[in-house]
Image (cartoon, grey):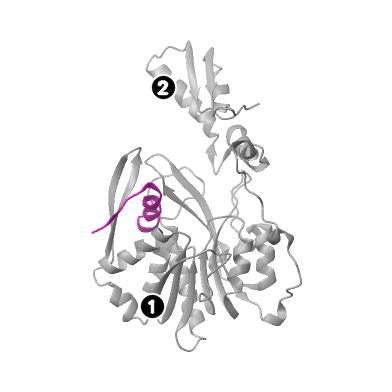
Amino acid sequence: MRIFDGVAIGQQISEHFSNFTDPVLMQKKPIQNWPEKFGQMAAEHINKEAENISGKVKVLFAHGGVGRSVLEIMRGCQDLIIDYTDTTANNLQVLEHLLEHKKIQWYQQVEGKLVEHMEFNLKDWESSEQLLKDEGNSISYWQADYTNLRPQLDGYAIIVTDFRIKETAQEIKHLSSKLIEGGLLIMGGIEEVTGKGIITGRSSPVTQRCSLSVLEKYFNEIPCDEALESYAHIYKETRNKHQYAISNFSIWRKKMDHEIDEEETIDEVQNPVSRPETTAQYYLDQSILTSYDQFHFGEGLLGIKNFPQKMAEVCIEACRKFKTNFDIALDAGCGPGRTAMELCKVLPRLRPMTTPRVLWT
């Protein structure tokens, strides 16, 4: 049986098919499994929508990743024709393998070349036949470009998508063209995390400005209880490094064609934000500089004390505990230098070292 190998896909499978239960210090505690939760919420609203549709319901899942949300939809729904898509073909193979063999195995990176073997199994009574044939469901797998979907991917009653990028205007515009009039868009999205607290209100005000403009042009938002919450979640990169994000949930119904003014233009959709291509361009990006400034010199984030400052305190405490010589030290990978500034208070000869050709002032 295949064991999925590779750092990136291992991290994704761990996020989708294992629960995060480690204690955390953040004010907003993460749920154990966001892809599972998102799929369960989507399934509930798909079933409500299906009550008003005769026959099988055609569903597109965009940005399906390695498939946990799609699995939860199949567990909770009947009579669906599902087109399950992702930008990476390898991701699609995970769910396909799970349905065929009733389990998946993968390696999760611990540190460096050290990995942990992990496994997820369907429930004893679950099988591909039970989840698909017995429930009247079918599934097809497609690698997709969400600004230029294949012509046959069209005419959906429902589109489900879990965005992990902040600005999604172009993709939302294209996906709207694949929905029938009055069709439903069930959407997860990433919220902007700032030092000013956590946003827990309705999803639409915290959607990026351009994406919200596109949503409001083509859709009407459908109020739902799940949109009143936001959902923190974490996945492990390694034993000591994790990615933390806050997602929201919202539902949108596509407007009738006569309600949409196609002559109305949204400049941001036509002129997407350019991404830095070189190291020099990267460090000229104001948003990048702002994030570094906030991380190194801000008061902290999500209830956690300023991390570079805390690192300096930990280092000083360890040096004193083990009676280390304080005469000279090297701070490798110092970035803008908050840790170095704190260390300089007790270390007379500290040499900060950061990325070559990058000088922080």
**Circle 1/circle 2 CB separation < 8 Å:** no
Residue closest to the eye, 64 or 126: 64
Residue 71's spot in the image, x, y percent?
Answer: 38, 68
State which quarter of the image contains the C terminus: top right
Secondary-structure class at tag 1: strand
Q: Is residue 60 above or below residue 266?
A: below
The residue at which mark 2 appears reads as 318
The answer to whether 189 appears left or right of 17 in the picture is right
**Which residue type does callout 2 highlight?**
Ala
What's the residue at 57%, 76% (across, down)?
179
Q: Nearer the viewer, mark 1 or mark 2?
A: 1
The residue at which mark 1 appears reads as 138
**Magenta stretch?**
1-20
Residue 202 visible to the viewer: no
Task: Based on the picture, tell me whether residue 14 belongs to the magenta stretch.
Answer: yes
The image quadrant of residue 184 is: bottom right
Query: Badge 2 local density, few (<14 within 10 Å), some, or many (20+)?
Result: few
